[in-house]
Amino acid sequence: MTSDSSEEGPGGAEEHGAGSVLRALEQAGFPVRTFTGEQRAVFAGLTPQELELILDLKARLDAVEPEVQAHTVVAGAALF
């Protein structure tokens, strides 16, 4: 019974829905509002492990931003 409340309740520890993934990406600086519907669907379907990986990659790329900034146009800015 306790698992029902943690899975369905807003902000529950076990909650991992599309909205929470997109919010985490947006808070990390991803331009979520500019994503196409298809891009949003792909990002929304990330597993917790994939989300952790992409957020870590983003943080590391941000740390060296001056070196990779010129590549954002080439890569479509989806990861930058």
Image: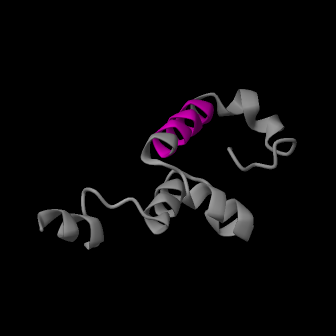
Farthest-out residue, left: 1
**Percent of width and height locating residue 46:** 54, 51
Farthest-out residue, right: 74
Q: Is residue 3 magenta?
A: no
When asked about the image quadrant of residue 16, the answer is: bottom left
Q: Is residue 33 above or below residue 71?
A: below
Q: What residue is drawn where x is 74% and y is 31%?
A: 68
Where's the C terminus, which quadrant? top right
Q: Nearer the viewer, residue 36 or 67?
A: 36
Q: What residue is drawn where x is 56% and y is 40%?
A: 54
Q: Is residue 9 above or below residue 24?
A: below
**Percent of width and height locating residue 27:** 48, 57
Where's the N terminus, which quadrant? bottom left
Farthest-out residue, front: 1
Q: Nearer the viewer, residue 70 or 54?
A: 54
Q: Is residue 59 magenta?
A: yes
Residue 71 makes an appearance in the image: yes
Q: Is residue 24 above or below residue 4?
A: above
Q: Is residue 51 left or right of residue 75?
A: left
Magenta segment boundaries in residue numbering? 51-62
**Percent of width and height locating residue 7:** 27, 65
Q: Is residue 5 above or below residue 13?
A: below
**Percent of width and height locating residue 66:** 71, 31
Dominant secondary structure (helix, strand or loop) of the stretch shown in magenta:
helix
